Amino acid sequence: MARRLTAVRARWWLLVLVFLTAASAGASAQSFWDELLTGIELSIGQSVAAGVFEEYGPPARLSPEEQQWLAAIFSDIAGRAQRKEVPYSLTVLDSPVVNAFAAPGGYIFLTIGLLDYIGHDTDAVANVIGHEIAHVERRHGMNALGRRLGLGLVLQLALGPPSEDSPVWHQVAVIATELMHLGWSRDQEHEADNTGQRLAAAAGYDPHGMVRFFTILRELEGLEIPFLEFLSTHPLTSERIERARVRAELLTPAPRSRPKPVSPYTPRGSAGEPEAPPFFVP
């Protein structure tokens, strides 16, 4: 027992020493902690993403034309993101659930259920992708996770990510997944809408695509469509729709060096699933 307490104290003092060393370097201290937290975020995101596949099933199979279309949109939007240290990726899940969400570390997910309703509208898809990237850009997931974990677990992670089979790592992954399902606050959604529309416009897409997406969601909400998970994690309010509409009027899509991708998407409810490799954009 005494040896265990000594080891714990040693780790705490090691962290203090590392912090003081970084702090003494002035401006480099911020860079040190940014790199440390980014490493933790990437590890957590990888674990959460693995759980997503267990819950929603494997990536969807899309035609080559659909893959190219989504890859082009995603590349345009992710290329405007500010967090260059995050390796953003997009996965389309073969699920009828109407949803889109982001995990820490830049993992962006769309479902076939969602694309069946907005896949005809390239600008709407671009704004949804921008919205999800914005959650990662603003560190909404990691900030919420930090509040739930508390200082003790954060310090343990800072001293070195535990192995995937450790109780600490399991606890962190479970909490991160729970937070992803609980959704975001009203302020976080407003912030993600704002940043997402601006990312889409900066990439040359129409920010009114967000308004059209919200209009579709409101119609689906009235029809009580099953599997409509997006609204449970992204609360839709009249204020949010109006803010998006006003913002869209103020934003001008940036000039594009190449034509905007044209949607070739075929809703799965009417045409079935094409034979193609699973879709994933690194």
Image (spheres, helix red, strand yellow):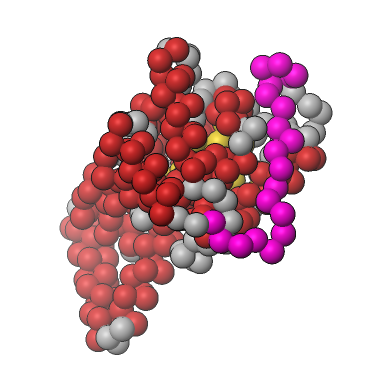
Q: Position of residue 127 (x, y in %)?
A: 51, 45
- Residue lying farthest to the bottom in this orientation: 25
In this rendering, the answer to whether 62 lies above or below 143 is above
In this rendering, the answer to whether 12 lies above or below 78 is below
Indicate yes or no whether the magenta region holds residue 62. Answer: no
Report the residue at 75% width, 19% height from top: 271
Report the residue at 70% width, 47% height from top: 261
Q: Position of residue 152 (x, y in %)?
A: 22, 54
Q: Is residue 164 left or right of residue 120?
A: left
Report the residue at 43% width, 48% height from top: 248
Report the residue at 62% width, 41% height from top: 122
In this rendering, the answer to whether 241 lies above or below 6 is above
**First to last magenta residue range:** 253-272
- Residue lying farthest to the front in this orientation: 249
Numbered marks: total: 0
Q: Position of residue 25 (x, y in %)?
A: 29, 87
Q: Nearer the viewer, residue 65 or 5?
A: 65
Q: Nearer the viewer, residue 89 or 213?
A: 213
Q: Quadrant of residue 229?
A: top left
Q: Position of residue 53 (x, y in %)?
A: 56, 33
Q: Is residue 134 visible?
A: no
Q: Is residue 180 visible?
A: yes
Indicate yes or no whether the magenta region holds residue 262. Answer: yes
Magenta part mainly helix, strand or loop? loop
